[in-house]
Image (cartoon, grey):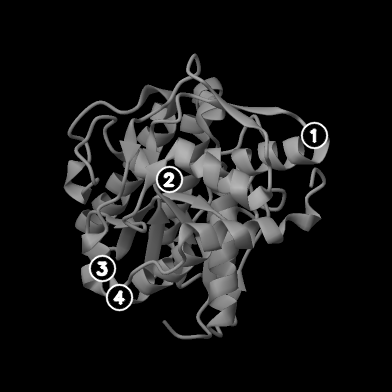
Amino acid sequence: MDKNSPIYVAGHRGMVGSAIVRKLEKEGFSNILTLSSAQLDLRRQTEVDAFFQANKPAYVFLAAAKVGGILANNTYRADFLYDNLMIQNNIIHAAWQHGVEKLLFLGSSCIYPKLAPQPLREDYLLTGPLEATNEPYAIAKIAGIKLCDAFRTQYGCNYISAMPTNLYGPNDNYDLEKSHVLPALIRKMHEAQKNGSPEVVIWGSGAPMREFMHVDDLAEASLFLMQNFNEPGLVNIGTGVDLSIKELALLIREIVGYSGNLRFDSSKPDGTPRKLMDVSKLNKLGWKAHTDLETGIRKVYAELGNQEWF
């Protein structure tokens, strides 16, 4: 990748896209293309096509997506499926039409079957039913992987796909109705500590196992793959280490300094019992995550002073 080549980061205001922009800037890439959703509606093919025609990006990091936790995914099922299909279809198609040299499509670990063997290997894709609560989002991401492979097969496009594990970091979403579990727990416990609340209620039993990676590690891995990976299919991005939601809650309670009780509401859905990425493929390519969870959460918590609720 030439440091002066035009690089389009779709979704640059989100947690993933902003981390990729920070990494590119740190590495000296000087021609980074970004537009907000107000300036460019990625769900509209004519707008996306006009942007690619005018700017001719050489590389594309496709990090734009409608995202959310279990509640949001299960409530806005049509929006999650439609919006994500339109966003990725328009960008991938425009990349082909306008001669993009290479594209990285970023998906999610939720593409794997609900009861797939653990850890999750890349070849477990489409081997069983998906987790129902986030099926629309997962289906869209699976379609994106297949679309990249189809353009590779039919037109020779160098489009690659990477599936990150659960992420956290700067520009995460702390809205309690739409956020993922880690930022939701940070906010709940911070507010409980600040307000002197005796108890924090946590969705589910606390038993599900989850893997979490700092988004700056993902950005580093994304640039590594853009520079070193040129194969069909997909590659997992993760730490290869997981813990239970209960263990995560206890860790966050310690970091926040909350001394109250944690009550797990088993009437609420747990989601997939376990999601741990097999990252041996990525490790063999030459990249490993390096931010341990406690260090990462402490860093994130220390940076939260700009949040209105903090």
Q: Amino acid at mark 3?
A: Asn
Residues at discs 4 and 3 in contact (Cβ within 8 Å): no
Q: CA distance from mark 1 to mark 3?
A: 45 Å
Other-residue count near label 4 (Cα within 10 Å), few / some / many at <14 / 14–19 / ≥20 = few
Q: Which residue matches tag 2? A: 89
Q: Which residue matches tag 1? A: 196
- In the rendered view, tell whether residue 158 sits above or below residue 254: below
Mark 1 or 3: the one toward you: 1
Instruction: Point out the tag, 1 or 4, that comes first from the N-terminus.
Output: 1
Picture disc at residue 228: 4
Q: Amino acid at mark 1?
A: Gly
Expressed as whole percent of the image width and height from the top left, the position of residue 36 reads: 68, 54
Q: Is residue 9 visible?
A: no
- In the rendered view, tell whether residue 23 sits above or below residue 244: below
Q: Which residue matches tag 3? A: 283
Q: Amino acid at mark 4?
A: Asn
